Amino acid sequence: MVDESEVPHFTLDEGYMVFIMQTDIFGHGLPIYTARMISAQKQTEFFHSDFDNLKKVRSIWICMDSEETEDSIEEIGFDRKTVFGNKRNSYHTDLMKGIIVNIRSGADSSSGKAVKKFQNVLIAMLEELVSRKDASEKKRILADEYGMTMTVELERRIQIMCNWSESIIERERIDAIGRMIRANITREQILSMGYTEAEYEKAESALYANA
């Protein structure tokens, strides 16, 4: 089970929580977090059995290294199915929803590969945010190409996402080096693949620490 304290996340607005992950962990996390967001309303939004006062919640997961060849946006929620009879009760099936935004693993144009900008505006903006460009360049692109006004609050949130995406990318590179070391690939071969001496030493230290 994923520990909430280890999952980078922030509250976007009331009822909306955003998580940033290297891979899609829907099977581990999304149902748990949406359920927690609902149960957290007890004694604040509703009391006893007054469920009509429940507020809608949305758990948004940005997955940076999907196995899919293209980006995608998935919406997951309750569904109604009458298996017998004609009565239909007015249940609020839209109270809990999860949104998974899958980012192409090759979306980072700094890798040297030519990457076509995605047609979906939301995904194209997110690909810029999780790329390896520095924060100032990301802000310029968002302002110039997408017409976003850089307020103090927006700049703060962009910086948060930049910090998290950089941390996740770095961790994935260290893990990749660790896997290669365990596979007996030499230091010289690993460095020739574009990894740095500092990354190699971090991976090596992590392996010794876990030995």
Image: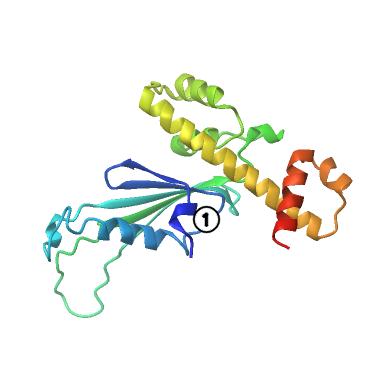
Side of 15 where 129 appears, left or right: right
Image coordinates of residue 177 in percent, x first then y, are 75, 50
Q: In which quarter of the image is residue 31?
A: bottom left
Q: Kindly indicate the quadrant of the structure image that contains residue 178.
A: bottom right
| Residue located at (69% from left, 61% from top) | 210
Q: Residue furthest front?
A: 209
Say if residue 118 shows up in the picture. Answer: no
Task: Give the residue drawn at x 69%, y 48%.
Answer: 174
What's the amino acid at mark 1?
Asp
Q: Nearer the viewer, residue 187 or 105?
A: 187
Q: Residue at x 88, y 45 (%)?
A: 188
The x, y position of residue 75, in whole percent, is 39, 54
Give the residue pinned by disc 1: 24
Horizontal side, residue 113 vs residue 161: left or right: right
**Image spot of residue 64 (x, y percent):** 55, 46
Q: Is residue 203 visible?
A: yes
| Lateral position of residue 143 relative to residue 167, left or right | left
Which residue is at the far bottom? 84
Q: In which quarter of the image is the C terminus?
A: bottom right
Vertical position of residue 59 compared to residue 108: above or below = below
Crowding at dot 1, Cα within 10 Å, few <14 / some 14-19 / many 20+, comes out as many
Q: Is residue 132 above or below residue 187?
A: above
* Residue at (14, 68) in percent of width and height: 89
- Residue 94 horizontal/vertical position (percent): 25, 57
Check disc 1 and report its element: helix, strand or loop: loop
